Image (cartoon, rainbow, N blue to C red):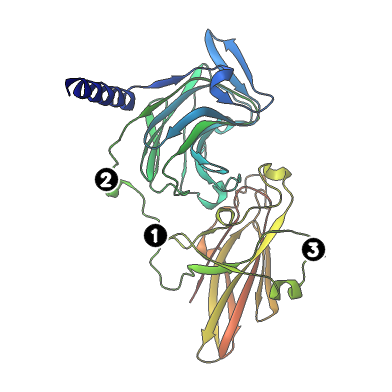
């Protein structure tokens, strides 16, 4: 019996130690699942990993709550460097520094990755103005607790994520780079961290009863102007999905694109989102909406709107962020059953739809 107590005590002590002590993930091939062009090399008296694009995943390590941190070498060229966590298949959370955007309002960004697609356009509230070091190493740290996270750059808090969007509570961790960036001193600490008070966290829930919170959507299909006709829309199969509490529908969460993971090199896909409205009389209603990237809107088989909200579609600084009041239509509803069909077309950076009907 004493032997059993001794073993139990030792195991408990080891678990407690692991949950509060950093685990260093050495920059060597045995620890990582890597893209083909990744390189391990000694640089600045450190073991480093040079990623020229894509993601690297730590082997045999699951992460729930705690701290993930890494050093990133200063880089003024256009590039992205960050951390991925709670990865399951092609869904994960991602925080990254846009190294060329130092001191700008979107220098740091958070995005959920759904079906291998970034969605930063859908979450403009999760970005921060940060000034990076232009020499040496920048330290990126993320503290994760259940559904929230806090981001630190060079030991200064820069961003609070009040609601991690994938709804995955455990998964793999790793590194992300777009173009070329160098990483060192990657480590993780498994522990519970106190969440900041609700008063310190932005509440993005919209309580308006006019917000559409449920849609029926089709599967994704490649988009061409000639290949889309209204007969195909009417005969398509639809699945019912719910929006986030804000009214945002992150389409990639539910639908896998035929071309994904290559940012602006993707081909365009489309889905159709359907909403049925019953009117008690003939009347005109105000339809307020936004979308990413492009949209075609029909009411009762008649086209009322086409638009393009793509990244850089209206200039090199145009982000394509979404807001309910960006677009409005006065739609003529007839007494009885009415159908709104929204053809939502996307290439990259966030496939989304939001709407309300006043």
The CA distance from mark 2 to mark 3 is 49 Å
**Residue found farthest to the front:** 1
> Which residue corresponds to the image point at 61% horizontal and 31% vertical from the top-left?
79
Task: Tell me if 136 is positioned left or right of 15 in this view.
Answer: right
Q: Residues within 10 Å of mark 2 (few under 14, many from 20)?
A: few
Q: Which of marks 1 and 2 precedes in the sequence? A: 2
Please tell me whether residue 117 is drawn above or below residue 56 in the rendered image. below
Q: Which of marks 3 and 2 precedes in the sequence? A: 2
**Residue found farthest to the left:** 2
Is the N terminus in the top left, top right, bottom left or bottom right quadrant? top left
Q: Which residue is mark 2?
A: 197
Cβ–Cβ under 8 Å for marks 3 and 1? no
**Residue found farthest to the top:** 45
Q: SS of the residue at dot 3?
A: loop
Q: Which of the two residues, 341 or 288, is positioned nearer the viewer here? A: 341
> Residue 100: image x %, image y %?
59, 30
> Which residue corresponds to the image point at 58% horizontal and 10% vertical from the top-left?
42
> Is residue 147 something one can see in this rendering?
yes
> Residue 251: image x %, image y %?
58, 57
Q: Which residue is mark 1?
A: 205
Q: Which of marks 1 and 3 precedes in the sequence? A: 1
Q: Which residue is mark 3?
A: 225
């Amino acid at each position: 019996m004493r032997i059993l107590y001794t073993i139990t005590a030792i195991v408990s002590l080891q678990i407690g130690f692991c949950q509060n002590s950093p685990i260093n993930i050495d920059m060597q091939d045995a620890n990582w699942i890597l893209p083909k062009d990744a390189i391990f090399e000694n640089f600045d008296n450190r073991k480093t990993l040079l990623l020229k694009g894509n993601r690297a995943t730590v082997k045999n390590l699951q992460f729930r709550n705690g701290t993930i941190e890494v050093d990133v070498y200063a880089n003024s060229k256009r590039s992205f460097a960050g951390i991925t966590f709670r990865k399951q298949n092609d869904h994960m959370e991602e925080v990254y520094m846009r190294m060329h955007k130092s001191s700008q309002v979107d220098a740091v960004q958070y995005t959920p990755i759904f079906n291998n697609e970034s969605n930063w356009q859908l979450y403009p509230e999760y970005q921060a103005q940060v000034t990076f070091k232009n020499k040496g190493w920048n330290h990126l740290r993320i503290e994760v607790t259940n559904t929230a996270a806090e981001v630190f750059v060079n030991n200064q808090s820069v961003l609070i994520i009040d609601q991690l969007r994938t709804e995955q509570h455990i998964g793999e961790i790793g590194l992300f780079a777009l173009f070329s960036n160098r990483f060192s001193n990657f480590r993780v600490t498994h522990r519970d961290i106190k969440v900041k008070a609700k008063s310190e966290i932005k509440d993005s829930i919209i309580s308006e009863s006019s917000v559409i919170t449920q849609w029926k959507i089709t599967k994704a299909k490649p988009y061409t102007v000639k290949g889309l006709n209204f007969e195909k829309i009417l005969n398509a199969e639809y699945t019912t999905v719910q929006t986030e509490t804000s009214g945002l529908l992150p389409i990639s969460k539910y639908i896998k694109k035929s071309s994904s993971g290559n940012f602006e090199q993707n081909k365009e896909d489309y889905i159709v989102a359907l909403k049925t409205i019953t009117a008690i009389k003939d009347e005109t209603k105000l339809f307020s909406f936004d979308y990413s990237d492009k949209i075609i809107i029909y009411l009762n088989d008649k086209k009322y709107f086409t638009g393009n909200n793509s990244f850089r579609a209206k200039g090199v600084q145009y982000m394509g962020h979404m807001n309910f009041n960006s677009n409005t239509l006065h739609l003529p509803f007839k007494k009885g059953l009415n159908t709104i069909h929204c053809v939502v077309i996307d290439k990259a950076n966030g496939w989304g739809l939001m709407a309300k009907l006043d």
